[in-house]
Amino acid sequence: MIINLLAFLVPLCCAWALVFIVILVSIFKRADLAINTKLLWTFLILVFPIIGLVLYFVQYKDKIVKKLIWFSILTLSLAVIAGATVDYYVFIKPTLPRDLSNEKGIEVSAKDIVKEFQTNESTSNAKYLNKVVEVTGEVIEAKKDQTGKPTVTLKSDDSFSNVFVTLRGDKQLEVKGGSTITVKGILVGFLSDVVINEGVVVKQ
Amino acid sequence: MSYAQKVYSTRTAQVKFSSSTAAEDIDATNNQVQSKFIGKTGQVMFSLLMKGFVFENAMMQEHFNGKEYMESDKFPKSEFKGTVNGMNTVDLEKDGAYPVMVSGDMTIKGITKPVKAAGLILVEKHRVSAESSFKIKLQDYGITGKDIGTVISNNIEIKVAAKYD
């Protein structure tokens, strides 16, 4: 959380500092002001940064000041965009749920994947665990789990071991038993069934 | 067949765990837990896949399954096998809430330890369900990530709820 905030504040502070330095330098470079007036503006801007800058910008609407206004707006906006981008990609995006629509699933039939896990569980785990799969098979049953999430079981050649999928959303799947569907989801592992979570029906 | 001899089973039992410290509250839920319960003998088992635990924060989920904590690629499953003590006080044919004690062996990350917990068997219109909650110590199961003791509590509360088919 604190690091999260830093990603945003660091570029913003740097941008502020840059804007201050550029403006103060430009004030001292002016030929039309007496040294006392320059010092007064410097003092005002340092003590009341925002009010000081606005007053200065309003007081001297010449060409240089207009350039400075654009420079300040651009620098500060860039800092905000940079901070927000870093913040999103480094700190926020990794915490969001996995987006399966961007991932190409491993295509496999329910019969084959159950056979693979039954033959050699550890090599199958290495191949499939936590991967996105697209499993095609015949529906044995479509139900809801005890929290109300829809589930579907796809048939293998062994009636004691099938593919069990918990689907996203809360609507029970409307399918006729015996029809063939394709489900995309994250492979969680192998208990007595091959278990898939975050499933989405891609073909019905 | 009387209800007492039946094998009650489900593939969608729920196991939740939570860790609470001043720094952070962490919760995860697994709704794909397999459980079997034999009424006559009181034998009960739960098995689950570590990757079936879903966290609200995907990064936490990755850390949980990673090398520093659960090493779920190496230890993909956890299991509890035990007995419900005092089944003689439970009538699975009669609606009610029956407090029981459960004892058995729990295996997490390849380490098996005895566990004892209070539980509740609920019977409602011939539907049997079971609930329990208990605490475990992470160090008992060889789980020693660097944030344990500060961000992550050493004592984890586990809640189990199974509605049998």
Image (tube, rainbow, N blue to C red):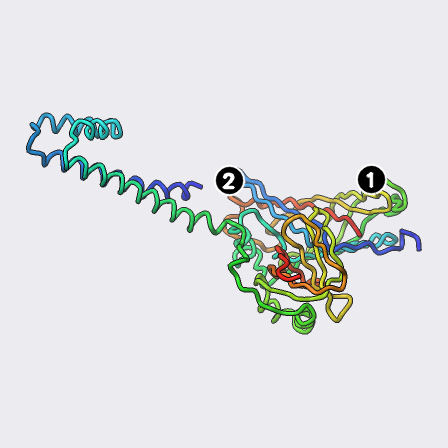
Query: Which quadrant of the view contains residue A44?
Result: top left
**Is B19 placed left or right of A190 in the picture?**
left
| Marking on residue A53 | none
Q: Position of residue A25 (x, y in %)?
A: 14, 37
Front-lying residue, A165 or B73: A165
Q: Quadrant of the N terminus of chain A?
A: top left
Q: Position of residue A151 (x, y in %)?
A: 70, 55
Front-lying residue, A73 or A43: A73
B89 to A177, vertically: above or below: above
Q: Amino acid at mark 2?
A: Ala
**Is B89 placed left or right of B50 in the picture?**
right
Tell us which disc is closer to us: 1 or 2: 1
Secondary structure of residue under mark 2? loop
Looking at marks 1 and 2 on the same chain, the residue that comes earlier in the sequence is marked by 2
**Is A116 placed left or right of A9 in the picture?**
right
User: Residue at left 90%, top 46%?
Assistant: B93
User: Residue at left 56%, top 64%?
Assistant: A105
Query: Which quadrant of the view contains residue A142?
Result: bottom right
> What residue would you read off at disc 2?
B23
B149 to A41, vertically: above or below: below
Secondary structure of residue under mark 1? strand
User: Residue at left 56%, top 41%?
Assistant: B25
User: Residue at left 72%, top 60%?
Assistant: A153
The reply to whether residue B50 is in sight is no
Q: Amino acid at mark 1?
A: Ala
Q: For mark 2, does the 10 Å Cα neighbourhood hold few (<14), some (14 to 19), or many (20 or more) residues? A: few
Q: Quadrant of the C terminus of chain A?
A: bottom right
Q: Position of residue A40 (x, y in %)?
A: 15, 25
Q: Are marks 1 and 2 on the same chain?
A: yes
Q: CA distance from mark 1 to mark 2?
A: 37 Å
A170 to A58, vertically: above or below: below
> What residue would you read off at disc 1?
B97
